[in-house]
Image: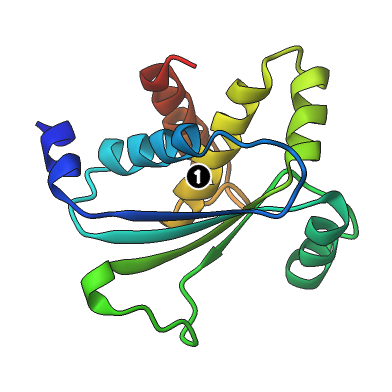
């Protein structure tokens, strides 16, 4: 039933790859759609995804989170200065991913790049939907459980 709901909606997942790494855009869309379906989203949604290099994500991490290091994923929720026509849907936000950090994490965790990429996309999308993992063990556990459930559904 949820799958039918998703397919009847015109959701937009806009992807920008600012790196030299080849990113499977269909895979990115499938992962984000799985999160939206699993969360019961029935509205038209617009999400932007940007793939950036280590230096760019480090600058963003320093500016917005005051952490002077590269990271794998950042999420930016809706801002008042974004103007998206309503017909396109509700602007949920932007997910910024650093493929180099994702690749490094995959190697450290002895897992596949696509599996690690799916995990950071799920993580970023859940943040846009209001999930948090800082400041409370309960919130951390809830978000982690949702990530694991969605990963299982994806079978990556």
Residue 137: % across, % down:
58, 41
Q: Residue at x 81, y 19 (%)?
A: 107
Residue at (74, 38) in percent of width and height: 21
Q: Position of residue 29 (x, y in %)?
A: 42, 40
Q: Which residue is mark 1?
A: 139
Neighbours of disc 1 within 10 Å: few (<14), some (14-19), many (20+)? some
* Visual colour scheme: rainbow
Residue occupying image coordinates x 24% and y 49%: 41
Q: Quadrant of the N terminus?
A: top left
Is residue 43 positioned above or below 109 on the image? below
Question: Under tag 1, what secondary structure?
Answer: helix
Left or right, 19 with reference to 141? right
Quarter of the figure with residue 31: top left
Is 153 left, or right, of 73 in this rendering? left
Residue 61 image point, x, y percent: 78, 61
What is the quadrant of residue 121 in the picture? top right
Q: Nearer the viewer, residue 30 or 137?
A: 30
Q: Nearer the viewer, residue 109 or 137?
A: 109
- Residue for point 22% across, 55% down: 10
Viewer-side residue, 141 vs 34: 34
Residue 6: give x, y in percent of width and height: 19, 42
Q: Is residue 88 left or right of residue 65?
A: left
Q: Residue furthest bottom?
A: 81
Give above or below for 82 relative to 150.
Answer: below
How many marks are shown on the rendered structure?
A: 1
């Amino acid at each position: 039933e949820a799958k039918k709901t998703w397919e009847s909606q015109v959701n937009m997942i806009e992807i920008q790859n600012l790196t030299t790494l080849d990113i499977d855009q269909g895979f990115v869309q499938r992962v984000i759609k799985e999160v939206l379906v699993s969360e019961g989203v029935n509205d038209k949604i617009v999400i932007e995804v940007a793939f950036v290099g280590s230096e760019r994500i480090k600058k963003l991490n320093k500016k917005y989170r005051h952490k002077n290091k590269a990271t794998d994923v950042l999420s930016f929720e809706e801002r008042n200065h974004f103007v998206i026509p309503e017909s396109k849907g509700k602007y949920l936000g932007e997910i910024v991913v650093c493929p180099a950090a994702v690749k490094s994490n995959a190697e450290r965790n002895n897992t596949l790049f696509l599996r690690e990429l799916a995990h950071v996309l799920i993580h970023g999308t859940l943040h846009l939907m209001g999930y948090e993992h800082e400041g409370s063990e309960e919130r951390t556990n809830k978000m982690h459980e949702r990530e694991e459930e969605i990963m299982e559904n994806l079978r990556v």
